[in-house]
Each structure stands twice: as structure tokens, then as C-alpha cells.
Amino acid sequence: MKGYLFKRNIPPKKFASDLRISVSYLYQLLRGERKPSPELAQKIEAYTEGEVTALQLLGIEQELEGQTLAEKYEKRLCNLEETIEKIEDTLMQMEWRISELEL
């Protein structure tokens, strides 16, 4: 959707107004923080004349592009596990330093 707006030189404020949504909600959609409702996704698809599809906006088309949702979530889980491991290592180092200071 970002690419569509950029390519067509459409200001986000106008796009949001045309879709009857707030500019802040549009920015949340553009940043991927939220997904549109199926109705809004269809409205965007109609507005863009199919250049941005409802399937893309709802994240369904990813499966068709080779990455299944299961693979996507498996990757996220892996990243979370790595992050947890780093946090645990940092906590252990901090505990060790605190115990050294107490001596």
C-alpha cells in the first residue's frame, strides 16, 4: 500500500479521507501495526483498482507467495526464543555482578 501511495503521489491524508478512516489508523496500517477489517481491505482493493489486493492486506496472499503462515510463525517463535536466551544471559551476568558487589 505504501508503494501504491508513493507511485501515485497520493498524500496519506487524502487517501485516509477518501477511505473515511483516520490518518493515524492509516499510518498504523502502513506500518503493519494493525490489519484492516475485511470490509476495509475490500474498499482499499476497489480504490486501488486491484493494485493492492484484499488478500495482501489481510496477510493471506503470503501463503501463495511461498511462505505459509506456519513458517512465518515458526520464524517468529525462533526469534523470540533467541531473544529470551539473550535476556536470560544478561540477567545471569547481572546477578553475578551483584553477587560480586555484595562480597
Image (cartoon, helix red, strand yellow):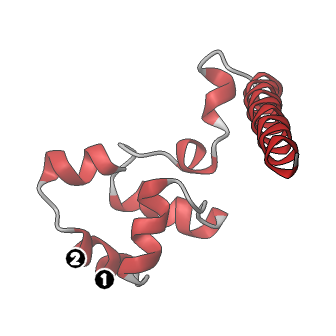
Relative to residue 65, is residue 96 depicted above or below? below
- Mark 2, secondary structure of its residue: helix
Residue type at numbered disc 1: Ser
Pick whichever, 76 or 4, lies toward us: 76
Pick whichever, 23 or 44, lies toward us: 23
| Residue visible at 37% across and 50% down in the picture | 1
Residue 82 spot, x, y in % from top left: 76, 27
Residue placed furthest toward the front: 103
- Mark 1, secondary structure of its residue: helix
| Residue visible at 35% across and 62% down in the picture | 47
Label 1 environment density (alpha carbons within 10 Å; few <14, some 14–19, many ≥20): few
Checking the image for residue 14, the label placed there is 2
Relative to residue 78, is residue 36 depicted above or below? below
| Residue visible at 16% across and 45% down in the picture | 7
- Quadrant of the drawing holding the C terminus: top right
Q: Are marks 1 and 2 in contact (CB under 8 Å)?
A: yes
Instruction: Specify the quadrant of the image occupied by residue 45.
Output: bottom left
Residue 42 spot, x, y in % from top left: 54, 60
Task: List the residue tagged with mark 1.
Answer: 17
| Residue visible at 15% across and 51% down in the picture | 8
Residue type at numbered disc 2: Lys
